[in-house]
Image: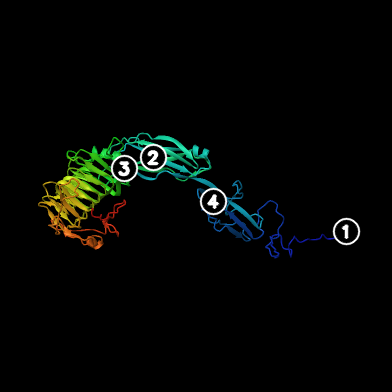
């Protein structure tokens, strides 16, 4: 009976200091923040019981990746969710997908609204998806009318294994009125990369101005990957060969250029896009180049070297009009910004109009060019231009020049203008009119601000003595402000030119064929060249050596062309023993 009347005992929930209403909170501070007192979890809302730290694991160790920022976040009651997430981590070659409750990415997604678990600390993991690193040659590929076929190499990388790489294909979409349907080589896989080669054949008009888009799209990408590139538009432009759209010339098409420019492309414009080394001629061939342009079919377009060089050009011909260009004609004909390194241009002793860059310049321009190779021929033989009937300016030659009549270090026969040029090679003729810079300066012609730095100028003839340090003969052309170094200049009856009578400079004025004397201490220093100025007699324009835009001075060298590459290292050569 007594037991039946006893009042039931009441017990406080664990860790509580005092009994509160069922929904009240209580805390006990024992160095830790403990959870609020509440009835046992019955599977309902996941209420927060105290401070909880969530760690965000980037879930990879790749170099170049970054952590989440911040990588730990703490939530305090009464909040039950984070409400915000940190800045996502990054990983090269992958796209961040989500935060996941398991490191293998197979758990539940964790968001800013996910209820926090009853833990003091827990970890969520970054989930990643590989992204294909496709290199699909974006931009514009310039295609010239002399090239009817084109091959594109396209690469896709970032695969996990060879099977994944093999499964990926490439779709194209192109204007088939202009191009034949693309042909594909089977894609080759190496490591994490697959390479496609697409062959195109052009069948449109020769001078299509508008770019033709080629759409490239990857297909059959495994689900585990993401390709972020979408459809790539590769624009294939056909160079027109007009002045504002020159045809590019490079290593791969130089031989085709040589053929094309001599036939259907004589009136077009070209630009060299890289340095080119020509292969030596394979026996029994003795030449690796055919001069572009003749007197009956002259080159009337232009060729801009773009500051590049062509090395190893070799011509061995019995024909006249020899050089990189045999014959150029007209005011649109311009050869410029080019270096010819080494090699030789050798025409027969009966052939005329021979130069390294141009055989005949008929009312065109040759400017900002240099040559280091040797030149030989019969008459009108020059280190840069054989016969000039236009303008040759800002050019130099360091190679030896040999011929019969009108032989000069830069120009053989001048019937136009030669300005701001110099020569530093030996010059020899065995007929008439042999000069260090110009062989014969003819009527209505002018030669200005030129310097002869030749070791020797020799005329090996039994009857003629028309030779000079700067010009072999000037009749009745104009000579203005030209100079020459002390050199071995002689008239010799010996074929080798070693004997004979040295010629004293009898007309060593600024305006004489022997040029004004300039000692080594002057031509070896920049002030001499910077002060070389004179007035063009036909235009009244002051002509000077431009060391800001065209020429450059380097100690120990003669002037070099600023905008032209190659190993320019001209020096004044010693006098022959």
Q: Earlier in the sequence, mark 1 or mark 3?
A: 1
Q: Residues within 10 Å of mark 1 (few under 14, many from 20)?
A: few
Q: Earlier in the sequence, mark 3 or mark 2?
A: 2
Distance CA(mark 4)–CA(mark 1): 72 Å
Residue at the spot 52% in from the left edge and 52% down from the top edge: 63
Q: Which residue is mark 2?
A: 152
Residue 214 in view here: yes
Query: x and y percent of residue 507 in the render?
Result: 12, 57
Q: Which residue is mark 4?
A: 62
In this view, the mark in front (1 or 3)? 3
Q: Residues within 10 Å of mark 4 (few under 14, many from 20)?
A: few
In this view, the mark in front (1 or 2)? 2
Q: Residues within 10 Å of mark 3 (few under 14, many from 20)?
A: some
Residue 416 in view here: no
Q: Which mark is residue 278?
A: 3
Near-viewer residue (396 or 102) = 396
Query: x and y percent of residue 5 in the render?
Result: 86, 59
Residue at the spot 68% in from the left edge and 51% down from the top edge: 43
Q: Which residue is mark 1?
A: 3
In this view, the mark in front (3 or 2)? 3
């Amino acid at each position: 009976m007594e037991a039946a009347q006893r009042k039931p005992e009441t017990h406080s929930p664990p860790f509580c200091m005092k009994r509160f209403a069922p929904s009240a909170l209580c805390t006990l501070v024992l160095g830790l923040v403990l959870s609020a007192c509440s009835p046992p979890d019955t599977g309902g809302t996941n209420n927060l019981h105290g401070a909880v730290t969530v760690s965000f694991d980037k879930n990879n160790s790749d170099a170049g990746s970054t952590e989440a920022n911040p990588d730990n976040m703490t939530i305090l009651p009464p909040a039950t969710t984070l409400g915000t997430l940190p800045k996502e981590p990054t990983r090269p070659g992958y796209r961040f997908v989500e935060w996941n409750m398991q490191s293998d990415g197979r758990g539940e997604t964790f968001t800013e609204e996910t209820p926090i678990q009853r833990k003091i600390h827990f970890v969520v993991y970054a989930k990643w998806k590989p992204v294909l690193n496709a290199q699909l040659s974006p931009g514009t590929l310039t295609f010239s009318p002399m090239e009817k076929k084109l091959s594109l190499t396209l690469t896709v990388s970032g695969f996990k294994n060879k099977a994944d790489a093999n499964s990926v294909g490439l779709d194209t979409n192109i204007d088939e009125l202009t191009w034949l349907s693309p042909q594909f080589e089977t894609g080759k896989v190496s490591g994490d990369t697959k390479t496609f080669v697409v062959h195109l054949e052009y069948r449109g008009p020769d001078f299509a101005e508008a770019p033709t888009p080629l759409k490239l799209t990857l297909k059959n990408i495994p689900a585990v990957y993401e390709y972020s590139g979408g459809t790539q538009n590769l624009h294939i432009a056909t160079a027109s060969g007009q002045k504002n759209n020159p045809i590019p010339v490079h290593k791969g098409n130089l031989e085709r250029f040589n053929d094309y420019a001599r036939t259907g492309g004589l009136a077009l414009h070209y630009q060299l896009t890289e340095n080119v080394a020509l292969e030596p001629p394979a026996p029994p061939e003795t030449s690796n180049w055919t001069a572009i342009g003749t007197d009956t079919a002259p080159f009337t377009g232009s060729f801009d070297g773009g500051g590049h060089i062509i090395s190893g050009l070799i011509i061995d011909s019995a024909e006249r009009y020899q050089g990189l260009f045999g014959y150029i004609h007209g005011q649109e004909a311009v050869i410029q910004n080019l270096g010819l390194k080494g090699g030789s241009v050798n025409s027969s002793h009966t052939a005329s109009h021979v130069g390294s860059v141009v055989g005949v310049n008929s009312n065109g321009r040759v400017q900002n060019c240099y040559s280091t190779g040797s030149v030989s021929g019969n008459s009108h033989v020059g280190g840069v231009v054989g016969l000039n009937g236009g303008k040759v300016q800002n050019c130099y030659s360091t190679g030896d020049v040999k011929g019969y009549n009108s032989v000069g270090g830069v120009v053989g026969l001048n019937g136009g203008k030669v300005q701001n040029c110099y020569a530093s090679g030996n010059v020899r003729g065995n007929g008439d009119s042999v000069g260090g810079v110009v062989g014969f300066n003819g009527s209505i012609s002018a030669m200005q601000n030129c310097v002869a730095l030749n070791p020797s100028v020799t005329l090996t003839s039994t009857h003629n003595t028309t030779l000079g340090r700067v010009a072999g003969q000037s009749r009745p052309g104009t000579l203005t402000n030209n100079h020459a170094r002390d050199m071995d200049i002689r008239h010799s009856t010996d074929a080798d030119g070693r004997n004979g009578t040295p010629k004293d400079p009898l007309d060593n004025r600024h305006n004489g064929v022997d040029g004004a004397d300039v000692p080594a201490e002057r031509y070896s220093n920049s002030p001499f060249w910077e002060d070389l100025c004179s007035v063009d007699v036909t235009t009244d324009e002051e002509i000077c050596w431009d060391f800001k835009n065209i020429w450059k001075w380097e100690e120990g060298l003669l002037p070099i062309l600023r905008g032209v590459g190659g190993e320019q290292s001209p020096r004044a050569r010693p006098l022959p023993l």
